[in-house]
Amino acid sequence: MKTTEIVTAHNVIIQYELASIFNRAWALLLDIVILFFYITICTILFTALFAGFAANDMFDSAEVIYTAFTLFMLPVFFYSFIMEAFFRGQSIGKMALGIRVVKASGGNPSIGELFLRWSFRLIDILLSVGSIAALSASSSDKMQRLGDVIANTCVIRLKSSTQYSIKDILTIKSKENYETKYPQVVQLSDEDMLLVKNSIERIRSYPNKQHKELIAELTNIISEKLNITTIPKNKVTFLKTVLQDYIVLTRS
């Protein structure tokens, strides 16, 4: 699992997972399906209109139909650029897969960068049937295809693949002969424990300054809720203990 750090507008560094080739391929396939239906509907509509005008010897109007059809096909050619420009780096396929184009250095790409990225699709994807894009992305630290390298962009996952659900909390087995340290944890909820568990996993996967600050803030909030005056120096260990105590006391 490859990651990249994105700097927000408030100078906060957030670590994201990079979208895999598999994620990007599925997003592309979904976009192709959508475009196929769009082309099919337009073709049926304009064919019917043209046949109607031709049957009535209205060839001047038929030429207008041809021109209109050509104009309606332009969005197909510029689809990915238009979508990513207006929807913050996402096409419909990318929205469905939860991935987005961002600047490799952080932030949203400019219109120019998105256009530059789009212009290399002809080489990356169309002419090579995606082989150049796959080869380039697999050999790049930031999973960048040729267009991404030129435009200085990359594609990230908006949600971590290591997120846990409430079901995960409910199915954890308690430890036998385990002695609880904070019996008051029963005041907390499954949602609280879900936040604790996800935060522990986050700091384990991405041990940067921002996540350490998040752990410290979460430790303070939990301590206040449970009226714990002495907070252990190792805050991750404290949160792990709180989580295990909760599981043992509520699932036994």
Image (tube, rainbow, N blue to C red):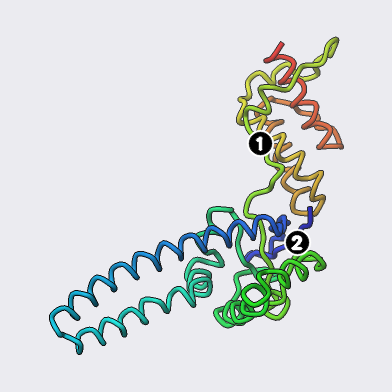
Residue 213: % across, % down:
75, 48
Q: Amino acid at mark 2?
A: Thr
Mark 2: few/some/many CA within 10 Å (<14, 14-19, 20+): some
Q: Amino acid at mark 1?
A: Leu
Residue 62 higher or lower than 228, as above or below: below
Residue at point 13% right, 80% down?
56
Mark 1: few/some/many CA within 10 Å (<14, 14-19, 20+): some
Q: Which one is nearer the viewer's eye here, 59 or 201?
A: 59
Residue 236: % across, % down:
81, 37
Tag count: 2
Residue at point 40% right, 76% down?
73
Disc on res. 54: none
Residue 15: % across, % down:
73, 56
Q: Which one is nearer the viewer's eye here, 97 or 242?
A: 97
Quadrant of the image occupied by residue 74: bottom left
Q: Which residue is mark 1?
A: 195
Q: Which residue is mark 2?
A: 4
Residue at point 80% right, 26% down?
241
